[in-house]
Image (tube, rainbow, N blue to C red):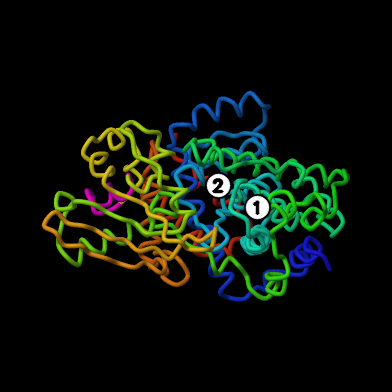
């Protein structure tokens, strides 16, 4: 059985009762996390322009934009909600695959549930879990350094699979849907290299494409078949023929990747998190402050240097700042934390932060894995001459170092409070409670009013 047939068979053969408890628990928590982050993403300064464009693409009121509450056609609302999940770099990630797939999958699945009705919490959990497996297994097979934006493209494939699962599609129709999604795939690392907000928009565009591919297949339109291993398939074109499907194929159906996802404790590129973890831990252990620091050196893979080694410049766009190790580490040193507000205009014009950021270096440690996020080693050189060193083998929030449950809830509540107008605390608590018992909900549409701030 080839790669795409293996994944389709996996998606179609599983139901809620056949999912292991650890997968169900992880799905519940990561859907919770994704919704909180997506609500907060409605505060992003690029949202007005995106909404204006979406409203010009067609009329309709099938699906709600999270946080702000506009009603748009299904594809447009999914595009906006996916962008909102991704736009603050706060959504969950698979550290090995380097993929943020929930940003595509959850908005698509919840949008379908709102439009169609009758989708239970169990059905949502099942579709998200299996769609994520499609996204992550395609990514895990890849070996070449990223040139195309893997989170958006793998996320789009996962979102298509989740929609097909919710609709109960047969294997042939699902094959067509995934083939048509393959025909839509888009996104390169150029936006990331420039720190452009189009990085997150690539996620939204692929989420919208998943809806289009799904609807085309449901209407009977055929798609290409051998989309992963064909001569012009995903592995040949996007991974330059270096993928090794055989290395991961036996895990499909045995290892549910949702249990290997990582929470993000900070709203920044995941590649910066070891730097934040280390300086915060070193400050707590040794009692120094930002004014005591001469230099910070982060020893990491070539991927980290390429992704977040960019210089920090006053007035830089928030998308660039989130992908700058210098800015993020300097913020952690000065504030003791990195929160949502660290990327608002006042913070992005703080001269003291940028002066300190210029003294943060990212150095290639020679790691031979071109896709490695870790391990990383952080050195803080103090003005008094001491050099403090801390190795970070596991990022906070990863399966090897889970984010504690109280911190998960604190993140969710902070996200709900970050928008204007904010979700009232009582409403956020009701939403929190509903998401924590997600598998008990007979129809997940009851979540939608709770995800919108009062007018």
Residue drawn at (62%, 76%) of the image: 20
Circle 2 packing at 10 Å, graded few (<14), some (14-19), many (20+), is some
Q: 143 and 223: which one is in front? A: 143
Q: 184 and 123: which one is in front? A: 184
376 relative to 71, above or below: below
**Residue 387 quadrant:** bottom left
Residue drawn at (87%, 56%) of the image: 172
Query: Is disc 2 placed on a helix, strand or loop?
Result: helix
**Residue 409 quadrant:** bottom left
Q: Which mark is residue 154?
A: 1
Residue 27 position in % (x across, y down): 56, 64
Residue 331 inside the magenta-drawn segment: yes
Q: How many marks?
A: 2
Circle 1 packing at 10 Å, graded few (<14), some (14-19), many (20+), is many
Residue drawn at (38%, 45%) of the image: 324
Q: Is residue 59 left or right of residue 51?
A: right
Q: Which mark is residue 422?
A: none
Q: Is residue 276 left or right of residue 146?
A: left
Q: 272 and 100: which one is in front? A: 272
Range drawn in magenta: 327-337
Residue 102 inside the magenta-drawn segment: no
Q: Is residue 97 left or right of residue 159?
A: left
Residue 241 position in % (x across, y down): 72, 56
Does the CB distance between marks 1 and 2 fall below 8 Å?
no
Residue 364 position in % (x across, y down): 42, 56
Residue 54 position in % (x across, y down): 61, 29
Between marks 1 and 2 in the image, the one whose residue lies nearer the viewer = 1
Tell me which numbered mark, 1 or 2, is placed earlier along the sequence: 1
Q: What residue is disc 2 on?
A: 448
Q: CA distance from mark 1 to mark 2?
A: 26 Å
């Amino acid at each position: 059985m080839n790669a795409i047939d293996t994944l389709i068979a996996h998606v179609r053969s599983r139901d809620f009762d056949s999912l292991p408890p650890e997968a169900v628990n992880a799905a519940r928590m990561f859907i919770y996390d994704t919704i909180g982050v997506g609500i907060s993403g409605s505060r992003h300064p690029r949202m007005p322009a995106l909404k204006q464009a979406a409203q010009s693409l067609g009329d309709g009121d099938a699906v709600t934009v999270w946080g702000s509450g506009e009603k748009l056609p299904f594809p447009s609302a999914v595009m906006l909600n996916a962008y909102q999940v991704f736009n603050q770099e706060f959504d969950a990630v698979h550290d090995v695959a380097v993929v943020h797939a929930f940003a595509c999958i959850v908005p698509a699945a919840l949008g379908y549930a709102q439009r169609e009705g009758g989708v239970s919490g169990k059905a949502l959990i099942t579709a998200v879990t299996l769609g994520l497996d499609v996204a992550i297994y395609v990514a895990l097979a890849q070996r070449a350094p990223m040139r195309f934006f893997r989170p958006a493209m793998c996320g789009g494939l996962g979102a298509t699979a989740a929609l097909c699962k919710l609709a109960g599609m047969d294997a042939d129709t699902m094959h067509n849907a995934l083939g048509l999604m393959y025909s839509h795939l888009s996104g390169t690392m150029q936006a990331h290299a420039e720190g452009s907000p189009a990085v997150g928009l690539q996620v939204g565009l692929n989420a919208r494409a998943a809806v289009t591919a799904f609807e085309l297949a449901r209407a009977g339109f055929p798609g290409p078949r051998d989309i992963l291993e064909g001569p012009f398939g995903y592995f040949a074109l996007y991974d330059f023929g270096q993928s090794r499907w055989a290395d991961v194929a036996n895990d499909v159906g045995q290892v549910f990747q949702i249990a290997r996802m990582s929470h993000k404790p900070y709203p920044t590129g995941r590649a910066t998190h070891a730097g934040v973890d280390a300086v915060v831990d070193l400050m707590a252990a040794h009692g120094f402050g930002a004014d005591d620091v001469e230099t910070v050196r982060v020893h990491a893979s070539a991927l980290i240097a390429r992704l977040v080694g960019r210089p920090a410049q006053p007035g830089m766009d928030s998308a660039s700042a989130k992908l700058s190790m210098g800015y993020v580490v300097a913020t952690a040193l000065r504030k003791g934390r990195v929160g949502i507000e660290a990327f608002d205009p006042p913070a992005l014009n703080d001269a003291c932060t940028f002066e300190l950021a210029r003294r943060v270096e990212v150095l290639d440690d020679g790691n031979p894995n071109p896709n490695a996020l870790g391990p990383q080693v952080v050195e803080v050189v103090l003005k008094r001459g001491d050099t403090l060193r801390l190795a970070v083998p596991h990022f906070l929030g990863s399966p090897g170092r889970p984010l504690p449950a109280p911190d998960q809830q604190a993140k969710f509540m902070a996200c709900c409070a970050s928008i204007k107008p904010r979700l009232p605390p009582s409403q956020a608590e009701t939403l929190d409670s509903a998401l924590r018992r997600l598998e008990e909900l007979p129809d997940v549409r009851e979540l939608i009013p709770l995800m919108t701030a009062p007018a």
